[in-house]
Image: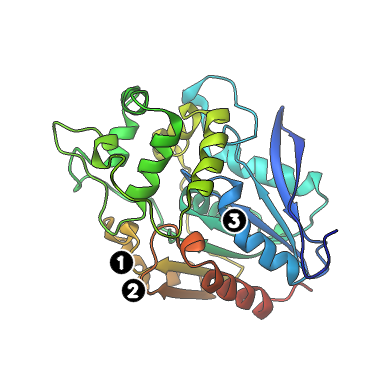
Amino acid sequence: MATAEQPQIEHSHLAIRGLNLHVAQAGTGELGTVLFLHGFPEIWYSWRHQMLAVAAAGYRAVAPDWRGYGLSDQPPPEPEAASYQDLQDDLLAIMDALSVPKAFLVAKDFGAKPAYDFALHHPDRTCGVMCLGVPFVHGGTSFATLPEGFYVLRWQEPGRAEADFGRYDVKRVVRTIYILFSRSEIPVANEDQEIMDLADLSTPLPEWFTEEDLGVYASLYEKSGFRYPMEMPYRSLHKRQRIEDPKFQVPVFVAMGEKDYVLKFPGIEAVLKDGVMAKFAPDLKVTHIPDGSHFVQEQFPDMVNELLLSFLKDHPVA
């Protein structure tokens, strides 16, 4: 039996806006609720370490699989309909279904975009936002200066990733993406290569990512496939609605691994170091984690847990 010191993660499905969305939960929530929002190629499981930490500290941890990911239902097969607004609306509906009046949002990778937008649109439902790997960039990021082989540009082409991934089983695809995204260099293919050619089975997994972890991810992507994950986020980036004159009314915390390849995206360093993001987030804290990669919450879970719990403690729920 689980004790207060040893919470366990439980799983259920919620009927949300015509879909059954999978939600992992832990903790009873005396101190409030923390909603964990994954990116790609992640899933609820990416937050396993943080969920148990906040649950043990007295919070309710909730980690959904986004629509089209993991154990959640696939949206109707209309790729052009994929929208960041759907993610915001799903998030609000999840909170309502779980009777959560306000929550802290902890987000990673593309999950940061709906987290930031939700906080701006629904400050009354948001206690604070902590994002890993992606700062708030007003108006989005331009990839015009990056080469044609840049993975985002490749994956935005309809059918290209599907053909590339289709040469291998799901486990190898997830394995390759985890290897590439854990490096400090932006994944870029040569003209005669595809993205999956940038690593092979002789390339070791990151030391903090086990074969057991890989097996969990592979089983979840075998369930969901990659159709929707290619639409959301990669082929929907241009459809994210710009918010005029954004101003965060809640505390915002950005934690970046110092070796996260995203820091090499055009403009990202400036947003963090030149005070650009602070113009939109008056209560802003930025932390860089030495040696941290794009998957810093799995690479250095204890460090991220400490930062997260400190953020929660500094902003108690009334």
Q: CA distance from mark 2 to mark 3?
A: 27 Å
Tag 1 or tag 3, which sits nearer the N-term?
3
Q: Position of residue 50 (x, y in %)?
A: 62, 63
Colour scheme of this structure image? rainbow
Disc 3 marks which residue?
47
Which label lies toward us, 2 or 3?
A: 3
Residue visible at 59% across and 49% down in the picture: 45
| Circle 1 crowding by C-alpha within 10 Å: few under 14, some 14–19, many from 20 | some
Q: Determine the secondary structure under disc 1.
A: helix
> Going by the picture, which residue comes out furthest to the left?
191
Under mark 2, the amino acid is Lys
Mark number for residue 9?
A: none
Q: CA distance from mark 1 to mark 2?
A: 6 Å
Q: Position of residue 31 (x, y in %)?
A: 79, 70
Disc 2 marks which residue?
273
| Circle 3 crowding by C-alpha within 10 Å: few under 14, some 14–19, many from 20 | many
Residue placed most toward the observer, 264 or 297: 297
Under mark 1, the amino acid is Glu
Q: CA distance from mark 3 to mark 1?
A: 26 Å
Residue visible at 32% across and 48% down in the picture: 180
Residue visible at 37% across and 43% down in the picture: 177
Quadrant of the frame with the C terminus: bottom right
Q: Determine the secondary structure under disc 2.
A: helix
Mark number for residue 269?
A: 1
| Circle 2 crowding by C-alpha within 10 Å: few under 14, some 14–19, many from 20 | few
Q: Are marks 1 and 2 in contact (CB under 8 Å)?
A: yes
Which label lies toward us, 3 or 1?
A: 3
Q: Position of residue 262 (x, y in %)?
A: 34, 57
The mark total stands at: 3
Is 18 positioned to the left or the right of 269 in the image?
Answer: right
Figure check: 97 above or below 35: above
